Amino acid sequence: MKDHKYLVSFAVASLVGITFAISTSKTLAQQTLQPSQTVSGIISEATSHLFVFDGEQYLGEEYNFEGRAGEKIRIAVEKEVGSNLLPIIVLIKPSGSVGVINNNEMELDLTGTWKVRVLSSQKTQGRYQVSLVKRVDQGQVLNEFLRTQQEAEARRTREAQEAEARRIREAQEAARVKLQEENLIPPSWGLTRVTCSGAGLVEIFINSKQACAIPTANLSAGRYGYDPVKDELVPLSVPNTVNPNPSNQEGSGF
């Protein structure tokens, strides 16, 4: 059980003239205060640190917590049953400014690591519990939730648009390649196109593409390139040229 409770927060007043120093040979091990978590402590000559506050020495313990500008907090210190401790609560800003704490809720004005020091007045000692409470701003929580949802929706929309644009580009490219391959041997040439596997075929190379056809009386098996100016197939292995459409000496119009 606890027999006394101090609700404390930072006095938002001028801090000019308030000084704080540490005068102890003990190692100062800071403990972290988490929101809504209670931490037990003890102030005694055997274990506590000696701090100099505003020109006087006090035994005490130090804690820290992470705060953001605009957050509202309240620090509670409760002495345990049988404890003679009369605490003084001091808060130190991330900037190093120091102030005594009063009973009002505090709104943080800086973002960073804040320090809380529990000191014993009148050389009292004893056990206590300290806790940090952060008041949740429901409007801020809602705004943050809506902002997150809007960002997620915008990201999904952007990704869907990019995926659709990519699909269209790929489909257009596939259609272009297919059309190019189909036009390697126009129907006007009178050739029967087949897959390029096996020997004894007409192999035609146009724009780094290859197409194959069954040999005819006018076009024997072999490797050919295409001359679009003359509309002729040019054998790649023999010097003769062959018109792919004997019935059209003026050109087939590839």
Image: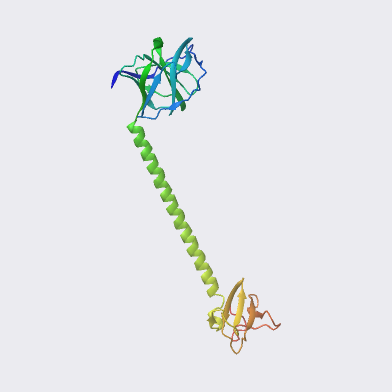
Q: Which residue is farthest bottom?
A: 217
Q: How many marks?
A: 0
User: Residue visible at 55% across and 81% down?
Assistant: 188
Inspect this view and state whether residue 208 appears. yes
Question: What colour scheme governs how the chains and residues are painted in the rendered image of this protein?
Answer: rainbow
The C terminus is located in which quarter?
Answer: bottom right
Q: Nearer the viewer, residue 11 or 140?
A: 11
Q: Nearer the viewer, residue 179 or 39?
A: 39
Q: Position of residue 236 (x, y in %)?
A: 68, 79
The N terminus is located in which quarter?
Answer: top left
Q: Nearer the viewer, residue 136 or 184?
A: 136
Q: Quadrant of residue 103?
A: top left
User: Residue visible at 36% across and 36% down?
Assistant: 143
Q: Position of residue 99 (x, y in %)?
A: 44, 16
Q: Position of residue 203 (x, y in %)?
A: 61, 80
- 216 vs 15, left or right, is right
State whether residue 75 is above or below residue 84: below
User: Residue visible at 45% across and 56% down?
Assistant: 163
Q: Which residue is farthest right?
A: 239
Q: Quadrant of residue 43?
A: top left
Q: Position of residue 75 (x, y in %)?
A: 37, 22
State whether residue 105 is above or below residue 174: above
Q: Which residue is farthest front?
A: 46
Q: Quadrant of residue 40?
A: top left
Q: Nearer the viewer, residue 231 or 56?
A: 56
Inspect this view and state whether residue 75 appears. no
